[in-house]
């Protein structure tokens, strides 16, 4: 029943045949996207990665081909041999790039059949994501998915080329290695040859890339696979790809310039411009203005509305006068019912020592002047939803009140964060009303990576550097200051003296790149001297013994002429997700895991045989 390919050669990709080819002989190969049987004429839409074109099987012209055309079904693999001809005027399909032509087939070869797939790649939206992941090979045939991975390829290549032009050397570091302290749980791989010992999969190439600077490579990069055993989210997978880089003798600005250059190149590859230099704000300012260290500039900022109330007002409202009083608006949401307000309450994090005042009518009754002033300060119109967030004196969370000159205390940060998180959640929920995200969607839709014409991305994408993060976070459970970043992050030189006496005041030489509410990457200037590294370990409560056990090799390396160095890593999947206009990383990761960390297609993780376990010196203890 099947035909052989023989020495048949393809002349065109399906999506590439054009009116200018009319009259030419043609051979295309691909999958049957749709089939329409009009009796003596059978139309086959043939699909390959370039697109779709229509082949016609005319019973008179090719009785044999027509008979095969009757037998083929969607997703059969065929070759159509024939001649390009212009379609009749009334049959032109302006929506298809190949809509002006069709292939008048003289022969059809059926190269393979296909079982009936659980969904058709010809469908636009497939609701059942589990099915898509289980039959990922069918899902990936969909034009949208083909486009995502084609885009990913373009973006990755542009980044590689930019870094190579900037004299970065691409180096592959090991996958089977030792634990890297990025703050997540490790994936461990048992050693067969060394019973009871384990490799760890890299959470990042952090230590290796620093050693490469010690080795004199000066500028390193890698499109690096990283593994972190943590809960999955829309923007987080246990296995992901970073554009990882490190450079010797840099200041922060040098790292920023390198990243801006390759990110601009990535955007250009997607058909979009991105103005440089990217704005830079401190962590404190970001918390104050956005209640988040991943600001989304498409939404209105938080407004400081402390001045709208007298001290008596605050007392009556049971608001902590020593903490921030902020308001924000979500545009065009309109009036919410009591029930709608209540439905939103679970999105407000009550564990941050902040309270929510969302019943504006009631506020206006009790405090007409204050309420009017809040609206004014927040720049709110009548259609906007206005929310007030302030410190709750009855719920004084355990946090540090340590406050350094001009900086925010932890308790203040928490109030801002409560407001910021709620703002983000509400903005997601009411996206169709405020429509602030649509500009990004429309730019992505309009952009054509294949054309030289670039779409202006300045209003749709808002990159921002966040700098001057605190070096430590206060851990309420233990009452200790714990590292906010990996332990190789250098503190600001002028804060070094306070490491032990006043940890809250120490700023890290650490930076994040954020865009549209997403953290795209983070990095830092590193500690390059052993004496300093030991002080930091001590400040972080890592004992000499523990440090030796965990990164002894690295401490040794630090003693052999380590240059000042620093770097950054950006999430490649996230960059592609933004530029593909996708809402979940699964749309741009080729074989992703589900929220429960399962690969539904390969059915992993899975049990292994007793023999394998024995070889690895492992005994599995059943749960419970
Ligand atoms: N290794 C860090 C990370 O994965 C990035 C860096 O500091 O360069 O977040």
Image: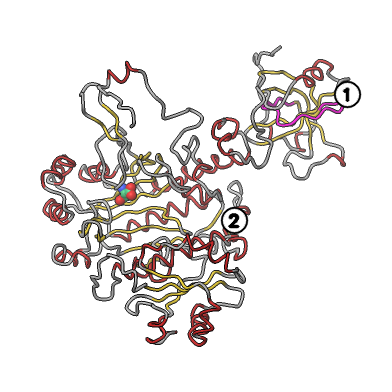
Q: How is the image coloured?
A: secondary structure
Rendered view: 410 above or below 477: below
- From the top left corner, tell me how far across and down residue 174 is, in percent: 29, 34
Say whether residue 286 is visible.
no
The kind of secondary structure the magenta stretch mainly shows is strand
Instruction: Name the disc covering residue 40, or none.
Output: 1
Instruction: Write the residue at 86% across / 20% down.
Output: 61
* Helix, strand or loop under label 2: helix
Q: Which residue range is magenta in the image?
A: 26-42
Instruction: Name the disc covering residue 441, or none.
Output: 2
Q: Is residue 469 left or right of residue 52?
A: left
Name the image quarter holding the N terminus.
Answer: top right
Nearer-the-camera pick, 1 or 542: 542
- From the top left corner, tell me how far across and down residue 306 is, in percent: 40, 81
Q: Is residue 428 left or right of residue 389?
A: right
CA–CA distance between discs 1 and 2? 45 Å
Nearer-the-camera pick, 147 or 502: 502
Q: Is residue 431 left or right of residue 105?
A: left
Instruction: Name the residue furthest front.
Output: 624
Picture quadrant where residue 304 is located: bottom left
């Amino acid at each position: 029943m099947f035909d052989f390919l023989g020495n048949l050669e393809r002349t065109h990709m399906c999506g590439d045949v054009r009116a200018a080819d009319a009259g030419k002989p043609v051979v295309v190969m691909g999958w049957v996207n749709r089939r329409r049987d009009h009796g003596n004429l059978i139309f086959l839409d043939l699909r390959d990665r370039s697109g779709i074109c229509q082949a016609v099987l005319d019973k008179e012209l090719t009785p044999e081909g027509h008979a095969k055309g009757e037998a083929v079904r969607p997703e059969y693999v065929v070759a159509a041999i024939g001649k390009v001809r212009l379609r009749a005027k009334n049959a032109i399909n302006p929506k298809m790039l190949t809509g002006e032509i069709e292939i008048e087939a003289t022969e059809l070869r059926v190269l393979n059949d296909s079982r009936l797939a659980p969904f058709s790649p010809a469908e636009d939206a497939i609701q059942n994501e589990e099915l898509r992941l289980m039959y990922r090979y069918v899902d990936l045939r969909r034009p949208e998915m083909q486009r995502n991975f084609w885009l990913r390829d373009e973006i990755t290549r542009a980044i590689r080329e930019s870094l190579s032009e900037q004299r970065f050397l691409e180096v592959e570091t090991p996958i089977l290695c030792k634990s890297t302290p990025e703050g997540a749980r490790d994936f461990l791989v048992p050693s067969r040859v060394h019973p009871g010992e384990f490799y760890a999969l890299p959470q990042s190439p952090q230590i290796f890339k620093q050693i490469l600077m010690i080795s004199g490579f000066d500028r390193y990069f890698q499109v690096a696979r990283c593994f972190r055993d943590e809960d999955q989210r829309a923007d987080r997978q246990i296995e992901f790809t970073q554009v990882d880089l490190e450079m010797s003798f840099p200041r922060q600005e040098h790292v920023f310039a390198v990243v801006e250059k390759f990110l601009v190149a990535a955007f250009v590859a997607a058909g979009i411009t991105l103005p440089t230099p990217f704005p830079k704000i401190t962590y404190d300012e970001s918390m104050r203005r956005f209640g988040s260290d991943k600001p989304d500039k498409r939404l209105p900022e938080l407004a400081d509305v402390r001045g709208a109330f007298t001290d008596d007002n605050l007392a009556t409202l049971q608001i902590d006068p020593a903490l921030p009083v902020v308001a924000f608006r979500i545009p065009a949401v309109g009036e919410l019912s009591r029930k709608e307000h209540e439905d939103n309450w679970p999105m407000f994090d009550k564990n941050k020592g902040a309270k929510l005042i969302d019943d504006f009518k009631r506020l206006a009754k009790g405090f007409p002047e204050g309420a009017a002033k809040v609206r004014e300060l927040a720049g709110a119109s009548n259609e906007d939803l206005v929310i007030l967030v302030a410190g709750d004196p009855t719920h004084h969370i355990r946090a540090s009140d340590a406050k350094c000159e001009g900086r925010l205390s932890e308790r203040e940060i928490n109030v801002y964060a409560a407001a910021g998180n709620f703002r983000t959640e509400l903005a997601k929920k009411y996206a169709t009303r405020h429509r602030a995200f649509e500009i990004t969607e429309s730019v992505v839709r309009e952009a054509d990576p294949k054309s030289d014409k670039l779409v202006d991305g300045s209003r749709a994408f808002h990159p921002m550097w966040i700098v001057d993060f605190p070096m430590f976070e206060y851990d309420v459970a233990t009452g200790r200051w714990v590292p906010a970043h990996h332990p190789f992050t250098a503190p600001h030189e002028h804060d070094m003296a306070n490491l032990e006496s006043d940890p809250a005041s120490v700023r890290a030489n650490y930076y994040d790149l954020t865009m549209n509410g997403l953290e795209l990457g983070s990095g830092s200037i590193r500690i390059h001297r052993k004496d300093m590294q030991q002080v930091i370990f001590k400040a972080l409560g890592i004992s000499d013994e523990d440090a030796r056990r965990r990164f002894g090799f690295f401490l040794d390396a630090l003693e052999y002429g380590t240059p000042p160095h620093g770097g950054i890593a950006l999430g490649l999947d996230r960059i592609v997700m933004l530029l593909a206009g996708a809402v979940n990383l699964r749309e741009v990761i080729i074989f992703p895991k589900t929220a429960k960390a399962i690969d539904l297609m390969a059915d992993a993780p899975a049990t292994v045989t007793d023999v394998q376990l024995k070889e690895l010196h492992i005994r599995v203890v059943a749960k419970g």
